[in-house]
Image (cartoon, helix red, strand yellow):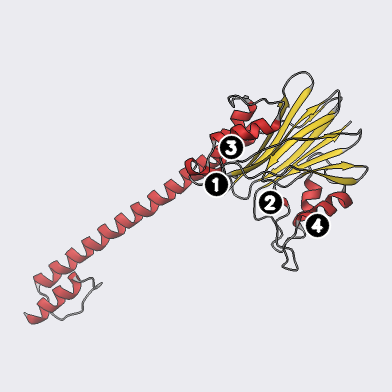
Amino acid sequence: EYSDLLAMQFIEAGAIDYYSTSRSKKTLFARIQAAIKRTQNNYHRQLYIRALELNKQSTSKEFTAASQYIADLLPRKTENDYFSINWSFLPSLQLGGDIFGYYWLDDEHFMLYLLDVSGHGLEASLYSVTIMNLLNNELLGTANFLDPSSILRELNRIFPIEKQNNMFFTIWLGAYNIHSRKLVYSNAGSQPAILMIDNKPHRLATKATIIGIDEDSEYENAEIQVPKNSDLYIFSDGIYEIKKINKEMMHLEEFIAFLVEAQACKDKNCQSFIRSIEKQSITGGFEDDVSLLHLHFN
């Protein structure tokens, strides 16, 4: 009797089985109950694992669809009598915080911009698309889209960091007049655009803070005359903020030197130049989103 009781306690406590010379019905019943319980637990475990797999597959499909949606929003590469535009976009994850666009404001003014939202993934991507839609549809209240600094002021007013889950963004934007060949530009916290004139780099940047950080930030314009056969490069910091093979970080000056030496984006999508930068990385790739926009002025 004591042996049967001990066997029942062991089995009910989780023992796979208990060897005993006893043929007691109580011990047999305990074994059957334990086997049923193990089967139920295994069944529930398999259901849970399957649910996780289905959720992962569903999430992956949703991210793929979202990624394709954003890719479809990016402008087409274009060529006309005034300029040609090529670009390359490499999100670090399936979704990233970089986005860019360009379009005609009127018959003689052409707008272009590149922005970089803090963070990665779905949240940063949704934020960047929201800003893109406002810019592309010129839905920024009192902003004058021929005046880049007024666009930045309005963006800074609309998107304070405390109302955006502590997210912020940097941006470079410009308005180009095809007849006067004058480029008016402004930026907020971003690295400068580079205008290559006779293979000499000219930094295009104004001193202003990141969008959303300070409601009292001031933004101003600068302008430059664009010569024929010059090249404009607008890029996110992910293209040069890499750890090199010697374990040092690449800096902006080094990246600009690469631009000068490689005469970047002579191919249709800038891929050969980007691969040359990737080769400098200790990991063989980029750690952040990478956007590179190239305009060749005819």
Determine whether, in the image, residue 282 is placed left or right of residue 56. right
Judged left or right of residue 262, residue 277 is left
Q: Which mark is residue 238?
A: 2
Q: How far is the residue under mark 2 from the one under mark 3?
A: 23 Å
Amino acid type at circle 2 is: Gly
Q: In this figure, which residue is indicated by the disc labeled 4?
A: 254
Residue 156's disc is: 3
Residue 203, image x and y in percent? 81, 45
Q: Is mark 1 on a helix, strand or loop?
A: helix
Give the crowd class for mark 1: few <14, some 14-19, many >=20 residues within 10 Å: some
Q: Of helix, strand and loop, which one carries label 2? A: helix
In percent of width and height, residue 250 lies at 75, 59
Which of pointers 1 and 2 lies earlier in the amino acid sequence? 1
At horizontal 85% and vertical 26% (from top left) the residue drawn is 82
Residue at mark 4 to residue at mark 1: CA–CA distance: 29 Å
Q: Residues within 10 Å of mark 4 (few under 14, many from 20)?
A: few
Q: Quadrant of the C terminus?
A: top right
Amino acid on which disc 4 is placed: Glu
